[in-house]
Image (cartoon, rainbow, N blue to C red):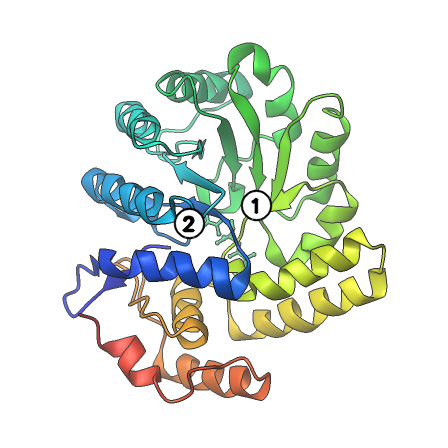
């Protein structure tokens, strides 16, 4: 996530909370891998210099605490994407991820691969992940098709972050690459259990910021083949939380309530979650015994220093 800390409409980034955020994820949520400057972090709404600084902060503060820091370096400009990829390598990140460029669009698989290949080549020693998120990019090229022969073009290809509800496509990606050691990271948190059944090897998502511990319990139950317990986690928490709303603004508000770390509002064109949403979320979280910080809401959401 980016920590945009207002009063101004620009939503400046509050870099100073990143260290605290790392500690919270590791100690309170049992989350030791982070995906920086993606959707939740509003990576595409940040300037290149902001993206560089956020990445540096996560890598620095995460040293000896986090296992992996993967930086999303996708951009509309190939040149900017390459600059960010090279930067990620220089600062010692563990991997890079890229979405499809979404204004002037790659119209088929080969064109998309050509773009990704040029970005990957700017960081030839870093594992490369394709970030498939068609609902936001508008690029509907199936992941299964994209993966076919991808290592010939992108030798550093390491895996996929699959943020789409098409479990058939996801299952085919897994099935057709069985011999390869790819990471199949699933990104629709509400469907994670189904994706595990289809062969997901991990998950990347916004809700793990505050549901990391619960999700780890679900993964554990799945591992133990205790499917009714796993299903209970999936339905109880994620379906419950989806009533609250899962947009980027809402995630920041929920995360502030749950963690006590001021995430601040998002940057335009996103808008801060409404007061009504926050009050409702606070009441629901309280009823679930989710809040360790019950009376800090106003301070956390409004005041940032
Ligand atoms: C569109 C979006 O933000 N997708 C995230 C990951 O990619 C997910 O983690 C969702 O936020 C999550 O599944 C809640 O809908
Ligand atoms: C949630 C997620 O995966 C992202 O922020 O990109």
Q: Residue furthest front?
A: 64
**In terms of image quadrants, where is residue 51?**
top left
**Horizontal side of residue 4 vs 124, given as left or right:** left
Residue at 14% over, 66% down: 8
Residue at 64% over, 37% down: 184
Q: Which residue is mark 1?
A: 163
Give the vertical position of 53 relative to 9 (above or below): above
The x, y position of residue 122, in whole percent, is: 35, 18
Q: Secondary structure at mark 2?
A: loop
Q: Residues within 10 Å of mark 2 (few under 14, many from 20)?
A: some
Say if mark 1 contacts mark 2, CB within 8 Å: yes
Q: Residue furthest top?
A: 152
User: Which residue is at the front of the view, 146 or 123?
Assistant: 123
Q: Quadrant of the C terminus?
A: bottom left
Q: Residue 281, which numbered label?
A: none
**Horizontal side of residue 90 vs 169, given as left or right:** left
**Horizontal side of residue 2 vs 245, given as left or right:** left
Q: Is mark 1 within 8 Å of ligand 1?
A: yes
Q: Which residue is mark 2?
A: 39
């Amino acid at each position: 996530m980016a920590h945009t800390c207002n009063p101004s409409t620009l939503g400046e980034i509050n870099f100073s909370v990143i260290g605290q955020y790392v500690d919270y994820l590791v100690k309170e949520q049992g989350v030791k891998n982070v995906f920086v400057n993606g959707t939740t972090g509003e990576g595409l709404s940040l300037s290149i210099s902001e993206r560089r600084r956020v990445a540096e902060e996560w890598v620095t503060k995460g040293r000896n605490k986090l296992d992996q820091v993967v930086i999303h370096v996708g951009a509309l400009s190939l040149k900017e994407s390459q600059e960010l990829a090279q930067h990620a390598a220089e600062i010692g990140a563990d991997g890079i991820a890229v979405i499809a460029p979404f204004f002037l669009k790659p119209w088929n698989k080969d064109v998309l691969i050509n773009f990704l290949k040029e970005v990957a080549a700017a960081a030839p020693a870093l594992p490369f992940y394709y970030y498939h998120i068609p609902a936001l990019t508008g690029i509907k090229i199936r992941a299964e098709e994209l993966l076919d022969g991808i290592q010939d073009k992108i030798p550093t290809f390491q895996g996929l972050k699959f943020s789409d509800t098409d479990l058939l496509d996801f299952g085919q990606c897994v099935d057709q690459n069985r011999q390869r050691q790819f990471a199949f990271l699933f990104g629709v948190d509400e469907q994670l259990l189904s994706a595990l059944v289809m062969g997901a090897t991990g998950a990347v998502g916004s809700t793990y910021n505050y549901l990391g511990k619960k999700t780890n319990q679900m993964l554990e139950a799945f591992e133990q083949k205790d499917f009714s317990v796993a299903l209970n986690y999936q339905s109880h928490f994620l379906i419950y939380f989806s009533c609250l709303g899962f947009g980027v603004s809402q995630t920041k508000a929920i995360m502030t309530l749950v963690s006590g770390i001021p995430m601040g509002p998002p940057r335009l064109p996103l808008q801060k979650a409404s007061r009504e949403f926050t009050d409702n979320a606070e009441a629901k979280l309280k009823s679930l015994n989710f809040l360790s910080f019950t009376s800090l809401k106003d301070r956390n959401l409004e005041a940032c220093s």
